[in-house]
Amino acid sequence: MAARPTIEEVAALAGVSRSTVSRVVNGSSSVSPEALAAVQQAITALNYAPNRAARSLASRQTHAIGLVVPEDTTRFFGDPFLASVVAGISDRLSDSDYILNLLIASDDPDGKMTRFVRNGGVDAAIIVSHHASDSFIERIAESVPVVFGGRPLRVRDSDIVVDVDNVAAAREAVQHLLALGRRRIATITGSMSMSVSVDRREGFRAALEDAGLQPAGEADGDFSEQGGAAAARRLIAQDPRPDALFVASDLMARGALEVLREAGLRVPDDVAIVAFDDSPLAVAADLTSVRQPMAEQGEMLAGMVIDLLAGRAPAALTILPTELIVRGSAPAV
Amino acid sequence: MAARPTIEEVAALAGVSRSTVSRVVNGSSSVSPEALAAVQQAITALNYAPNRAARSLASRQTHAIGLVVPEDTTRFFGDPFLASVVAGISDRLSDSDYILNLLIASDDPDGKMTRFVRNGGVDAAIIVSHHASDSFIERIAESVPVVFGGRPLRVRDSDIVVDVDNVAAAREAVQHLLALGRRRIATITGSMSMSVSVDRREGFRAALEDAGLQPAGEADGDFSEQGGAAAARRLIAQDPRPDALFVASDLMARGALEVLREAGLRVPDDVAIVAFDDSPLAVAADLTSVRQPMAEQGEMLAGMVIDLLAGRAPAALTILPTELIVRGSAPAV
DNA sequence: CCGACATCTGGGAGCGCTCCCACACTTGTC
DNA sequence: GACAAGTGTGGGAGCGCTCCCAGATGTCGG
């Protein structure tokens, strides 16, 4: 907890002016080699670290990017999708001089998070796992540039979004189950306040309709493992029992698998499963799953924010590719 | 992205001085009711939010607390222990006017995280999941007050630590297995670069020694689900096979359970298991587990940091109680 | 009726930077 | 040899706050 030297002290030691030190610190080109060397030496000698607050105040930027996740802590931590996205974001950001600020709160009752953003806590925000009810998001978008991971339910013209084609991906997943000869196909959806859930259900319904079939059940699993288990319990209690499940996330599928096992149902013989995300969970549980490039999505989100802050306008809508990864829970035909 | 009003503009509208507005914003007492009302009105009218950077610069504090987690993102997200601790910290902090800054990095190659802290990014840091090799922690502790969740391997006099008695807790866990009549007891440990792992193994050994027994195996599961599975695989390959496992975390136990099931071994009949953490995972998997108050630990860590910053010196070492929660994986005698 | 004290208020100074302009000094050009 | 066009450098101003001191006003007791 040594006293922190100021730029002025570094300048004095290096025998140059404040400005020159600032140029060195900020990597400006027009500094003579001698001055550069002297300043660098002074910096290490004094163990100088520029004051963030002063820098922010003068330059009007914080060099911080907020990742807003409107979920409670438990959910945030449990979900491999979010984990991968965060990993992607961190990865991309570690090449830049921005730092990541995780802002996790299912809602923002006292407005602390919103206030933090509005007070100039971050230069921009990435928003993932956005629910229709998250009104504080709008207040955030008013004060800072924003990029969405996953389309918000109500898109405004100015919104910048990175997403996958959930409808098409879900359709393909269900078509795989159909190709396997399954006819009583049910789905476990995510929360309907999120567009991903709505879209995947839409793809599910469309595929069945194309085949002239009715859904064998739709249950909300709320994107959690327990929710997936509960939904599976409801679905297999039906008569006739579904012979296939399209589950909107690996995590919910894991919960469902447990329930099927307890019920003595074999996967895929009795019930075939296609899940979504292709997270490490899918590998571990041998789940056929729709791969969406989660880490890439994170990287892309981060890259877009950087572009945005650099004055380059990113594309309003980016659609990333998905791919059905076939494993044991719904094997190849 | 409306222009942000300054304190000066608020003052002008309210017909008072900058200072009075500052007093209102910071909750100072000596402001007349009329002035208070006028200022509050002006603040809402202009939608004023004080500039964080300016405030930090002038007051020399950031009102941010860093949570340093020296793990990679995947591990950070997967572990229910960390999830609960973070939840506890957020909870406690949400009553204060501090915000939480998650600093997650298994190491800090370019020193960005360290630099952030040293640049005055946070007022203090909470460090959890500390490994012996994390040298950047020391640099952080040099520039900012620090509180440890879980004893670091090398404790310095000035360190403030919140922990549980891992040795005693592990001992009790193993004694439960002994009381069940198990005699070939093995353990799956966490990473040996962490004191929790060393301590729990010590408790394991001590309990066996008290009973005049030898460990039936010790395997490092690295506190991950896959690590736990791999460790279990190694342990059950031994001859004679262990009839009980003390696993140093619920997450590793989950991995082990899967392996046991695949091997056709029944729990608890063939292999009894006592795990550690008593996270939601333990409930879901019906694991007997040592409860440690994770959320409370988080709350306590946060409270201590707040105390520290308020000039109140917290106790150097706080030991939280543990309790063995008996479930199906190692039922009551 | 005046000093002693509490209560409220205003404004100067300064936090540690960045940004911009001005000023050397060099180099090249016709 | 005068002028234009670079280079590198220094310092003033200012970012939007907080902190502190001084002043204004009110209150009370002797």
Image: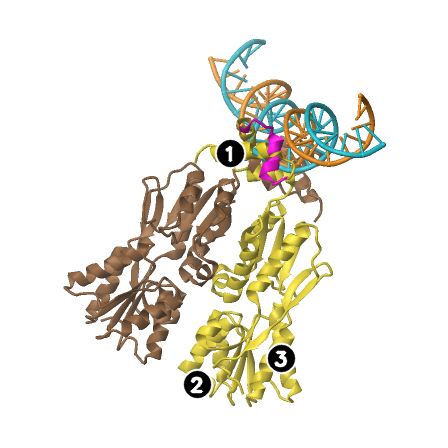
Chain colours: A brown, B yellow, C orange, D cyan
Please provide the residue range marked out in magenta.
Answer: B14-28
Cα separation, mark 1 vs mark 3, equals 62 Å
Looking at the rendered structure, whether the residues under marks 2 and 1 are on a common chain is answered as: yes
Pinpoint the chain carrying mark 2.
B
**Marks 2, 1: nearer the viewer:** 1
Residue B18 falls within the magenta-colored stretch: yes
Q: Which residue is mark 1?
A: B41
- Location of residue B252 in the rendering, given as x and y in whole percent from the top left corner: 50, 73
Pinpoint the chain carrying mark 1.
B
Pinpoint the chain carrying mark 3.
B
Q: Which residue is mark 3?
A: B171
Count residues near mark 1 (Cα–Cα under 10 Å), then give few for <14, some for 14-19, many for 20+.
Answer: some
Task: Examine the rendered structure and indicate whether residue B61 appears above or below residue B258.
Answer: above
Q: Which mark is residue B266?
A: 2
- Location of residue B309 in the rendering, given as x and y in whole percent from the top left corner: 66, 50
Specify the amino acid type for callout 1: Gln
N-terminal of the pair, mark 1 or mark 3, is 1
Does residue A193 appear to the left or right of B210 in the view shown?
left
Q: Looking at the image, which is closer to me, B160 or B111?
A: B160
